[in-house]
């Protein structure tokens, strides 16, 4: 198999301008589900410079995620999940290895180009929500489009639609301070999705929520995935991860398993982790 082409900048890559709401890529002629993320032999070593023993946070991670997938990356604390998310999200660079996002090898991009790629292709959801408390809910979400070149009126229209999609449309003029954790996470998810990114990265999105609210957030991510969003959810919670169709287990900086559920026989409720 030949490797995918490399584009020097995001603007060179095909399919960026006309992606409809929540996914729905133009597909290549012979590739119905193009890879939106390709990782090859990633390593990340912290503190290999002066003082202290180096930490080998990632030790050779290869992974491909196709458009439309919903993937859990699961592993115990310290296994390298956040490091991996930061590298996928181009917030940090690997020590070695290759990251391709939406067909673009990010190693060739400078910081400015990386910022543009992030703004266009990646939506982030964090455990701590990171909302601007002094701004309305609507403007928090509209800010997800700041780099998209849209005017404020259009940004707000798209933000209102995204808030509708996550079920908090009626609170759009409130401030986040007045809202519950579950509602805040819905707003953060709307902000991540409003620009129709190639990938949504969620790092422990239910970590600050009670289990019932966490389940609802997971359900929401499932619904958004069914509408076409490609989502990677990082969690240390096996129960949550087991609800998702594909689970990539990470341990000590390595992928130790990558499991996809087969279609379930009618009348059973079994996942292949429940043995
Ligand atoms: P997880 O998210 O699975 O808990 P992390 O990616 O946060 O794991 O951490 C993986 C390992 O790398 C841990 O041993 C952690 O202490 C170490 N680590 C993470 N970030 C840094 C950093 N900025 N500097 C040094 N060590 C780090
Ligand atoms: Mg972490």
Image (tube, rainbow, N blue to C red):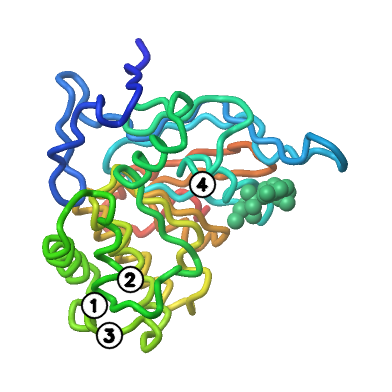
Sequence-wise first label, 3 or 1: 1
Q: Which residue is mark 2?
A: 186
Sequence-wise first label, 4 or 1: 4
Q: Which residue is mark 3?
A: 174
Q: Residue at x 37, y 33 (%)?
A: 101
User: Which dot marks residue 220?
Assistant: none
Q: Residue at x 35, y 19 (%)?
A: 6
Sequence-wise first label, 1 or 2: 1
Give the CA separation, mark 4 to mark 1: 27 Å
Left or right, residue 70 beside residue 168 = right
Q: Residue at x 16, y 53 (%)?
A: 150
| Residue 156 in which image quadrant | bottom left
Mark 2 or 3: in front is 3
**In the picture, which quadrant includes the N terminus?**
top left
Residue 137 x %, y %? 28, 76
Sequence-wise first label, 4 or 2: 4
Left or right, residue 128 beside residue 225 = right
Mark 4 or 3: in front is 3
Label 3 residue SS: loop
Mark 3 or 1: in front is 3
Give the CA separation, mark 1 to mark 2: 7 Å
Give the CA separation, mark 3 to mark 1: 10 Å
Residue 165 x %, y %? 19, 67
> Within 8 Å: ligand 2 and the Cβ of disc 4?
yes
User: Which dot marks residue 85?
Assistant: 4
Q: Nearer the viewer, residue 16 or 217?
A: 16
Label 2 residue SS: helix
Q: Residue at x 45, y 31 (%)?
A: 110
Residue 76 visible in this rendered orientation of the protein: no
Sequence-wise first label, 2 or 3: 3
Number of numbered discs:
4
Residue 117 visible in this rendered orientation of the protein: yes
């Amino acid at each position: 198999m030949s490797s995918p082409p490399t584009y020097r900048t995001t603007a060179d890559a095909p399919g960026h301008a006309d992606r409809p709401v929540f996914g729905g890529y133009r597909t290549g002629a012979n590739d119905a589900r193009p890879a939106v993320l390709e990782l090859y032999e990633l390593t990340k070593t912290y503190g290999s410079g002066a003082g202290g023993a180096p930490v080998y946070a990632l030790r050779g991670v290869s992974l491909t995620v196709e458009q439309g997938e919903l993937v859990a990356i699961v592993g115990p604390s310290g296994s390298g999940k956040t490091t991996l998310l930061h590298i996928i999200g181009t917030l940090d660079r690997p020590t070695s290895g290759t990251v391709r996002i939406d067909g673009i090898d990010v190693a060739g991009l400078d910081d400015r180009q990386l910022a543009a790629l992030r703004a266009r292709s990646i939506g982030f959801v964090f455990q701590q929500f990171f909302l601007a408390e002094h701004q309305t809910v609507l403007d928090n979400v509209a800010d997800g489009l700041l780099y998209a070149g849209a005017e404020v009126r259009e940004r707000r229209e798209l933000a209102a639609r995204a808030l509708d999609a996550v079920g908090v449309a009626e609170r759009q003029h409130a401030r986040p301070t007045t809202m519950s954790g579950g509602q805040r996470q819905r707003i953060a998810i709307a902000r991540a999705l409003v620009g129709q990114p190639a990938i949504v990265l969620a790092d422990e999105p239910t970590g600050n929520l009670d289990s019932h609210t966490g389940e609802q957030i997971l359900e929401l991510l499932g619904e958004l995935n069914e509408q076409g969003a490609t989502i990677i959810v990082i969690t240390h919670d096996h129960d949550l991860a087991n609800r998702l169709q594909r689970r990539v287990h990470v341990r000590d900086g390595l992928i130790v398993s990558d499991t996809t559920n087969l279609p379930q026989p009618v009348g059973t409720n079994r996942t292949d982790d429940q043995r």
